[in-house]
Each structure stands twice: as structure tokens, then as C-alpha cells.
Amino acid sequence: MDTVVITGASRGIGAAIAREYGEHGDRVVCCARSKDALDAVASDVREAGGEAIVQRADVRDEYDMERLMETAAREGGEVDTLFANAGVYHGAPGETPLAEESYSAFDEHTQVNGRGVFAAIREALPHLADDARLLVPSGSIARDASAGFGSYAASKAFAEALVRQFAAELEYPTAVVDPGQVSSELTNGMQGRDPDDVAPMFRWAATETDPEEIDGAVLSLRDWKSATR
């Protein structure tokens, strides 16, 4: 039984990953800012046959992240996979030009989507299994600028830069997982794939890919589909 930590597990991709691991009988440590939503996801995990540990935590707070990882290790043993998934988007995708954004939106994007990745990975390090993997969901907007995505796009680029730097410095494979456009609350109703349809991609990235090949890389939907045909 693997122990998996997922930040931002209360909705969207994070919740779908939790359910995917539950179906494989694994132990899922879920965190988010909404305890009620987390409890609902935990119930799904348990009904699917997995174990669920829930802790309300804010990725912007390093002490919350420290407590989360200590809880995961105490109750579930060494952490096999971390999905630093928590993210926010203030505004409608494509309608938040950088020059018009508020400072508060800029700060929230960089703190959650960037600093939150740093804090989650940093605080997980003392509790990782020898063959652990560190995975960060992202999207093409982090690499290919498009008008109207403002500081959200910049914050995802920040997150991907952190992945590359951690990959260069750590012994644990660290990678970006890009499932393409996914429909969730974060995308404000934009059309995309159902999170549950791409959740197996994240488990594939954590369990079936070559650790040396993925280190510092971006794993795309095409990579997953090619590998699992």
C-alpha cells in the first residue's frame, strides 16, 4: 500500500487523483482549506477501498505543510508520492490581463501556485521513501504565453521552474504532469476533460514511468497515451 499526499485534494484534479488511488487500495493523505469538501473526498476514497487521512491545511503556510507531512509519516509511514496540486485562479481564464490585475490577485496566485509548491516539497523531504516521486500538475500556459492569463500563467511558470530546480538538486524524481485542458472550478466552466478521466495519468506518472527519464521533465497527455496503448 502506497502513501500518497495530495494538496488541493478537495476538488478538481486533486479529488480525482485521490479517488483513483482509493480504487487501487492505497493510503491517501488529503489536504485543502475546506474541511467539509475534504471529508466528502475521503468518503469516496474509503468507499473505493482505500484509506484516507484528512487534514485541513493551507499551502501558503509552511507550518501547515510541516504538520501535514508529519501526520502523513506518523499515520501512513514514509511518503511514496507527493502531488503538489493546490492552485487558485482569480477571474475567468483568458480574461485577466496582467496589466489590469490587482496586487491581491497577483499575490494569491504566486503564493498558492508557486510558493505552495515550494513549501509542500520542502516539508515533505524528511518523510519521503527512498523511491518517492514529486509531481506537480501544470499546463501549457506556463510555457506558451497567451493573452488574458496574467499572473496565473506566471505563477504556473514559477511552479515549473521550481520543479526543474528541485530536479537538479534532489535525488528524488521531480516532474510536471500536464493533462491538457481539464474542466473544473478552477477553469470557471471552460470546456475540458473530466478530471476523473485524466486521474489515471497521474498514477501512471507516479508508478510506471522511468524515474530517470521523467526527472525535470513535463509529462504530457500524449506521453501517457503513447505509453499505455
Image (tube, helix red, strand yellow):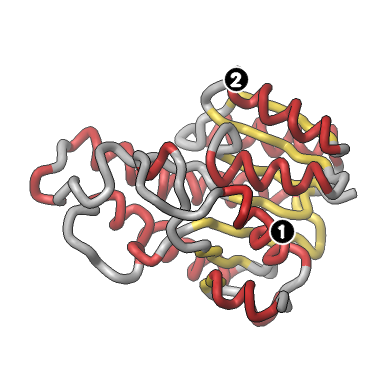
Name of the residue lying farthest toward the left: 99
Give the residue pinned by disc 1.
203
x, y percent for residue 201: 65, 62
Name of the residue lying farthest toward the right: 1
Q: CA distance from mark 2 to mark 1?
A: 24 Å
x, y percent for residue 26: 84, 45
Closest to the observer, 202 or 126? 202
- Quarter of the figure that contains the C terminus: bottom right
Closest to the observer, 107 or 181? 181
Rendered position, 5 above or below 104: below
Q: Which mark is residue 119?
A: none
Residue 221, quarter of the rendered image: bottom right
**Image point 17% across, 60% down: which residue?**
147
Rendered position, 201 above or below 76: below
Residue 43, quarter of the rendered image: top right
Q: Which mark is residue 35?
A: 2
Q: Is residue 168 visible?
A: no
Q: Nearer the viewer, mark 2 or mark 1?
A: 1
183 left or right of 7? left
Amino acid of disc 2 = Lys
